[in-house]
Image (spheres, grey):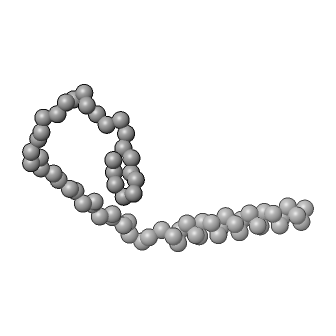
Amino acid sequence: MRMRTTRQRLAICFLLAAFARLVLAQPPHPIHAERPVTYTYQIVQTFPHDPNAFTQGLVYRDGFLY
């Protein structure tokens, strides 16, 4: 009987500690994240190309992208 009471007390202490940690960890006011920077672009010039030509793969070696 004593072992059961000890387990119950430990369980209650654990739950109270976990609850207190959750309550104290909450900020008093909601924090609003800043909006990310939005980048725009402008097409300056286009070039004709063969739509059947494509790159099979890219390789990065010695600081260069091939």
Which residue: 39% across, 47% down?
59
Q: Residue at x 76, y 67 (%)?
A: 10
Residue 14, how many percent across, how many down?
Answer: 69, 66
> Quarter holding the N terminus?
bottom right
Q: Position of residue 19 (x, y in %)?
A: 60, 66
Nearer-the-camera pick, 60 or 28? 60
- Name the residue located 55 percent from the left edge and 66 percent from the top edge: 22
**Rendered image quadrant of residue 9:** bottom right
The spot of residue 43 in percent (x, y) is 11, 46
In the picture, measured across the screen, residue 27 lies left or right of residue 37, that is right
- In terms of image quadrants, where is residue 30? bottom left
Q: Residue furthest front?
A: 62
Say whether residue 8 is left or right of residue 63.
Answer: right
Q: Which residue occupies the extreme right position in the image? A: 1
Q: Position of residue 40 (x, y in %)?
A: 17, 53
Residue reaching furthest left? 44
Residue drawn at the location 78% of the way across and 63% of the way down: 8
In this view, 8 is above or below 65: below
